[in-house]
Amino acid sequence: MSSGRPGRAAIACALLLVYLIWGSIYLAIRLVIDEAPALGSMGARFLLASLLMAMFLVARGGWRRLRLTWRELVGTGFLGVLLLACGNGLTSVGQLHGVPSGVTALLVAMVPLWISIYRMVSGDRPHGLELAGVGLGLVGLAVLVLPTGGGQTGLPIIGVAVIVLSSLAWSFGSWIKPKIWLPQDVYVIATYQLLAAGVAMALASMASGEPPLDVDVGARAWGAFAYLVVFGSIVGFTAYTWLLQHAPLPLVATHTYVNPVVAVVLGAVVLSEPVTPALLAGGAVVFVSVVLVVSAQARPPRTSVDRSARPSEARDRSR
């Protein structure tokens, strides 16, 4: 994509990539962890993506492009562990405990709500629309998680708790990001974040006693793994970063609405995951709550707030 003012077609193409790629990674994660250790496979995914991005950056700008100060190194490492290892990698653990990929996407979609809560706790005065969205989102979470009538037992609590924890970690990292020393180049940031997350998850895999990675897995798992490395961690992030620089933020934020829909449809079609009344009702409530929160954040704030911490920017994850 050119460095000049982009046309509508280029913006639409990048937006479509983010819609489809980030909506499909939950299915890809499920396909991988069905045959490979969750922490180890996701750690390997981040490490390989980091290596590929580093090679690209060196080819374009030499080794100097990867140089960081100690403060920048600590900052990128901290965010890599918080955003990717905790905020992204732990979703694989939640799915391993039986949470469907579509529900996982809905729980992750609540990131803007958690960021709003962090901002409120820090003294920010929210719009009434934002408060309504947060309250509605918590209701949607309850509808998704709690048992329903008719003999349905609801979702596995441990898996849901892990995914909510990962969403909270991602949200906190997104909220605190403007306060951390980071390099100017967003692609350098992503490279070191991926590296830190990969190392952290590899260590967590060994500490938890996971079996070592085995190359003897099926073609479907290998294909999903390659998809996560190339598209989830590199192409999707690059498209999103480009959009942040060239498209209106309310437009970019629409991926928060679309990704869960893509994930639910793919999970139902490919894995035959059930689309229950509770999923439809809870998903609709969560969808509306996220729309309310992001719409409120698009309005002028009541107090002077760092706009870089808005929920519409909460998902600049190098997946």
Image (cartoon, rainbow, N blue to C red):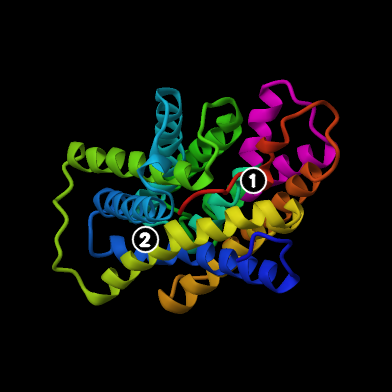
Residue at 56 percent across and 56 percent down: it is 106
Residue at 44 percent across and 23 percent down: it is 71
Q: Position of residue 68 (x, y in %)?
A: 41, 32
Query: Circle 2 sits on which residue?
Result: 229
Q: Residues within 10 Å of mark 1 (few under 14, many from 20)?
A: many
Query: Height in image: 181 above or below 252?
Result: above
Asked whether 119 falls inside the magenta stretch, the response is: yes
**Considering depth in this image, is 197 or 147 the residue closer to the camera?**
197
Q: Range of the magenta residues? A: 113-140
Q: Is residue 112 left or right of residue 7?
A: left
Query: Height in image: 195 above or below 60?
Result: above
Residue at 30 percent across and 64 percent down: it is 32
Q: Amino acid at mark 2?
A: Val
Q: Is residue 178 left or right of residue 168?
A: right
Numbered disc 1: secondary structure? helix
Marks 2/1: CA–CA distance = 22 Å
Q: Quadrant of the N terminus?
A: bottom right
Q: Position of residue 75 (x, y in %)?
A: 46, 29
Numbered disc 2: secondary structure? helix
The answer to whether residue 146 of the structure is visible from this angle is: no
Query: Circle 1 sits on which residue?
Result: 313
Quadrant of the rendered image containing residue 73: top left
Quadrant of the rendered image containing residue 84: top left
**Considering depth in this image, is 119 or 231 the residue closer to the camera?**
231
Q: Which secondary structure is most common in the magenta stretch?
A: helix
